[in-house]
């Protein structure tokens, strides 16, 4: 299994992946920057002295990386089907569940790297932002909770991404599906119909990251632990489906 | 040189249907170590499907395919036992052949020098650091072969490996395949043209419409082939009509008409119909035997398939 994971890491280390990571950090800056005007605005739902402010900024910063890991996870299989390398991958390891697990592990490693980079980046950015407006920087419990939750969310999302790719196989269909779902469907449903949206993976993630106040959905999301459980439920479902179907399908 | 653990390929009642299409129909055959076994059949005969089932990529509807008695997914270290080149197997265009082979070698815990060794063996050493996206079809085919040889396997499975190779490449491949078999390996190679394997194969499996029509030594097939002829004429349509009327089977090829009749018969027929001939040679090649087999199976099948449609 170590050899398989190593091979998967080699596949990930491409120029495209590096660019995606850079682009993501740029977008993280934009996302946080977009929330700048709201910081310190007397009408904002979160005040400058709120102990949850930094946690909120950091949590908001994960909006883009979440999408990135799902897309990156999706590439793990769709790229192989697109270029026909899946044949040599399965010839090397005909027990396909092992290939699936190796891809999950390699992406989990990648997600840890992305999570650390995003955390460091958005925390620095957030602290600079708050201090520049003479706010009080507090590394409250909530900050650490959100930071820990970010690792869980990112790991869950890469598992879901790999599973989506394994099931859909077609690269464009998988990428478009993921983008439409995460950026359009969830972004519309969660604010408008929180009663439904909070049960979706995105709503559950917002709950786990405790983003209710930042998103103006205070009290409308699930509690953080329940949100976490719902997200893990989706992850388990994706995992099971991929484990069941991948070994049975013909590779043509 | 004989290898330590020779490994025969065995197909036993191998069957695959895709919905209504019966792609492979109860094929049973053996490919032995030290021999080149050719799997021959026209387009759509079921060659690729058979080989993909053998390699565990496609699940058989029924039957088994094994290497020395074990299914592909039951082999320990499959890459060291079996190497394969399949159509539609590829490489990421942004990678170099060396990167591609290194990833495969890493996944299967092969020695670090294996990629450079196989690149040299397949004549790609000079292109090792170019991006595969810039490769020609023939170079990709060689890269596929390099990947198959990474684990120095006992068995080689090649699906139409001459696709995209130029004539020197085809000749090189023939020699390479022959040498691998002479080293004691089992080589199973598919092709749609008998002429391609005529000089290398020891044993021939003829497949059409998913069914195995023949399994025989190449020499036996050659002995049966009988005499045929190859004709060149500026007026092929009239000659074809005459041949048809006389009940001779024929086929248009790049070099002219291949006729399932002796040169004497063809020459007399042409003279009787006043058709000018630019060339007439006797051919004892196997193409005709192959061609006849497939045609016979086609005519034998037609009633069966109408029956199937009616029920
Ligand atoms: N995924 C699929 N779905 C439906 N039918 C299929 C599928 N794959 C193959 N077939 C059918 O199975 C039959 C055998 O196909 P196969 O690709 O094995 O032939 P082949 O001998 O390799 O042909 P070629 O010389 O063109 O490569 C064909 O009739 C083909 O249409
Ligand atoms: Mg084929």
Image (spheres, coloured by chain):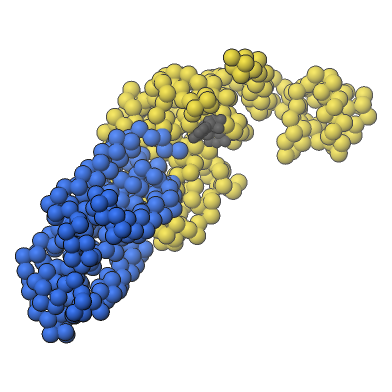
Residue A165 point in image, percent of width and height: 35, 48
* Residue B120 in sight: no
Which chain is assigned blue?
A: A
* Image quadrant in which you'd find residue B11: top left
Q: Is residue B183 above or below residue B305?
A: below
Does B267 appear above or below A113? Answer: above
Q: Quadrant of residue B4?
A: top left
Q: How many marks?
A: 0
Chain B tint as drawn: yellow
* Residue at x 33%, y 36% (from the top left corner): A245
- Taking the image as shown, residue B182 lies to the left or right of residue A62, namely right
Q: Residue at x 25, y 79 (%)?
A: A37
Left or right of B197 in this view: A5? left
In percent of width and height, residue A80 lies at 39, 48
Q: Residue furthest left?
A: A141
- Between B131 and B22, the residue placed more toward the observer is B22
A12 relative position to B230: left or right: left
Q: Which of B81 and B123 is in front in this view?
A: B81
Location of residue B233 by image quarter: top right
Query: Which quarter shows the C terminus of chain B?
Result: top right
Nearer to us in this view, B77 or A12:
A12
Residue B13 visible at all? yes
Quarter placement of the N terminus of chain B: top left
Q: Which residue is located at x 29 percent, y 35 percent?
A: A244
Residue depicted at 15% across the width and 49% down the height: A226
Q: Is residue B209 above or below residue B109?
A: above
Locate residue B121, reporting x and y percent. 42, 48
* x and y, in percent, of residue A47 in the image: 14, 75
């Amino acid at each position: 299994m170590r050899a398989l994971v190593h091979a998967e890491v080699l596949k990930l280390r491409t120029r495209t992946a590096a660019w995606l990571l850079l682009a993501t950090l740029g977008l993280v800056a934009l996302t946080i920057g977009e929330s700048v005007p709201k910081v310190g605005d007397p009408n904002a739902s979160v005040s400058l002295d709120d102990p949850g402010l930094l946690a909120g900024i950091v949590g908001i910063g994960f909006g883009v990386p979440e999408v990135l890991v799902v897309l990156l996870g999706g590439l793990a299989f769709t790229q192989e089907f697109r270029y026909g390398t899946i044949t040599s991958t399965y010839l090397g390891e005909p027990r396909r569940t092992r290939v699936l697990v190796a891809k999950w592990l390699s992406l989990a490693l990648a997600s840890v790297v992305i999570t650390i980079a995003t955390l460091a980046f958005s925390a620095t950015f957030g602290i600079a932002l708050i201090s520049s407006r003479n706010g009080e920087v507090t590394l409250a419990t909530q900050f650490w909770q959100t930071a820990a939750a970010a690792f869980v969310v990112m790991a869950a999302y890469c598992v879901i991404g790999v599973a989506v790719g394994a099931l859909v196989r077609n690269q464009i269909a998988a990428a478009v599906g993921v983008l439409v779902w995460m950026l359009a469907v969830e972004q519309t449903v969660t604010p408008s119909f929180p009663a439904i949206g909070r049960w979706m993976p995105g709503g559950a993630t917002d709950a786990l990251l405790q983003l209710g106040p930042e998103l103006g959905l205070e009290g409308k999301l699930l509690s953080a632990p329940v949100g976490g459980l719902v997200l893990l439920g989706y992850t388990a479902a994706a995992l099971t489906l991929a484990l069941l179907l991948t070994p049975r399908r013909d590779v043509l | 040189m004989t290898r330590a653990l020779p490994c025969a390929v065995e197909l036993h009642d191998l069957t695959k249907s895709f919905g209504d299409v019966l792609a492979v129909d109860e094929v049973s055959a053996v490919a032995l170590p030290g021999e080149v076994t050719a799997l021959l059949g026209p387009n759509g005969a079921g060659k690729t499907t058979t080989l993909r089932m053998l390699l565990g990529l496609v699940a058989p509807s029924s039957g088994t395919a094994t290497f020395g008695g074990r299914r592909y997914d039951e082999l320990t270290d499959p890459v060291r036992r079996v190497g394969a080149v399949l159509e539609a197997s590829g490489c990421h265009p942004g990678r170099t052949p060396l990167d591609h082979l290194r990833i495969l070698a890493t996944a299967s815990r092969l020695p670090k020098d294996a990629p450079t060794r196989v690149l040299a063996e397949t004549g790609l050493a000079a292109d090792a650091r170019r991006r595969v996206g810039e490769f020609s079809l023939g170079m990709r085919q060689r890269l596929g072969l390099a990947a198959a040889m990474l684990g120095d396997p006992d068995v080689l499975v090649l699906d139409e490996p001459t696709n995209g190779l130029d004539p020197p490449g085809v000749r090189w491949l023939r020699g390479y395949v022959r040498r691998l078999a002479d080293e004691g390996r089992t080589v199973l190679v598919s092709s749609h043209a008998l002429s391609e394997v005529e000089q290398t194969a020891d044993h021939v499996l003829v497949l059409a419409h998913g069914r195995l029509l023949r399994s025989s030594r190449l020499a036996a097939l050659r002995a049966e082939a009988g005499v045929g002829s190859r004709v060149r004429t500026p007026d092929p349509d009239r000659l074809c009509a005459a041949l048809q009327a006389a009940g001779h089977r024929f086929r248009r090829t790049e070099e002219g008409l291949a006729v399932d009749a002796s040169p004497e018969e063809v020459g007399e027929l042409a003279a009787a119909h006043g058709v000018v001939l630019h060339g007439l040679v006797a051919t004892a090649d196997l193409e005709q035997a192959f061609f006849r087999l497939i045609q016979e199976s086609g005519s034998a099948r037609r009633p069966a398939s109408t029956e199937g449609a009616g029920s």
